Amino acid sequence: MPPFVLASVSPARRRLLQTVGIEPIVQPSHFDESLVNAESSDALVKILAQCKAETVAQEMKGSLILGCDSVLDVDGEIYGKPASKEEAIERWQIMRGHYGTLYTGHALIDQTRDKLLVYCGVTKVYFANPSDAEIKAYVDTEEPLKCAGCFALEGKGGVFVEKLEGCHSNVIGLSLPLLRQMLKQLNYEITDFWEK
C-alpha cells in the first residue's frame, strides 16, 4: 500500500482519519489560497483541494495524497476562516437563526497509478439563535478563528448547531463516506489503510 498523506495541518481532519483507523503522514501544503478565484463555492473548494494535494505531491513521491478545503456559503457569501474576532462576531450575528451550506473539496492523488480524483461534499447546517453574549463568549474562546465558517461542530460550536442535512464529518473537514468511495474508485478498500 502506498503511504497515506494528508496535505493539511488541520487537527480535525487528522483526528477523523485516526478515528477510522488511518494514521496519515501529515504534510502541510503551505499553498497560497489567495491565488485562487472561482465562481462558486463548489468550484473554489475543489480547486483549492487539488492545488494543496498537487503541491504536496511534488515532495512526497509514491504516495496517496489527500488534499481538502472547506468553506461555508451563507446567502451566497463565501466564508473561510475569519480574519479577526470582530469579523467572527459579525458573521455569527448574520448566521444565527439561519442555515449555511458547508462545501468541502476532496482531491485524492494516487501517484502509484498516476490518477487524480476531485469531488465536493455538501452539507446543510442549521444554526441556533445564540445571544450576543453567547456569541462573544464563543468567539473569545478563539475556536471560531481556526475554522471555515466560524464554528467547530466537534467543539464548543456544536452547541450552536441545531440540525444537519448531509454528512456530519464533511462539516468537520472531511467526508469519510466520500473518502471511502474515492478509495474504491482507485481500487483500494479503506480497510487497506487501517493500522495493522
Image (spheres, rainbow, N blue to C red):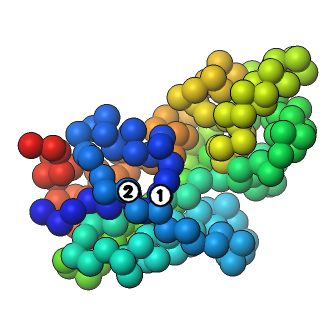
Q: 71 left or right of 189? A: right
Q: SS for tag 2?
A: strand
What residue would you read off at disc 1? 8
Q: Quadrant of residue 99?
A: top right
Disc 2 versus disc 1: distance between alpha carbons?
7 Å
Marking on residue 159: none
Looking at the image, which is closer to me, 103 or 109? 109
Q: Are marks 2 and 1 in contact (CB under 8 Å)?
A: yes
Mark 2 crowdedness (10 Å alpha carbons): few <14, some 14-19, many ≥20: some
Looking at the image, which is closer to me, 165 or 102? 102
Mark 1 crowdedness (10 Å alpha carbons): few <14, some 14-19, many ≥20: many
* Residue located farthest toward the left when viewing the structure as drawn: 196
Residue drawn at x 65%, y 53% as measured from the top left: 71
What residue would you read off at disc 2? 26
Q: Amino acid at mark 2?
A: Val
Mark 2 or mark 1: which comes first in sequence? 1
Which quadrant is the N terminus positioned in? bottom left
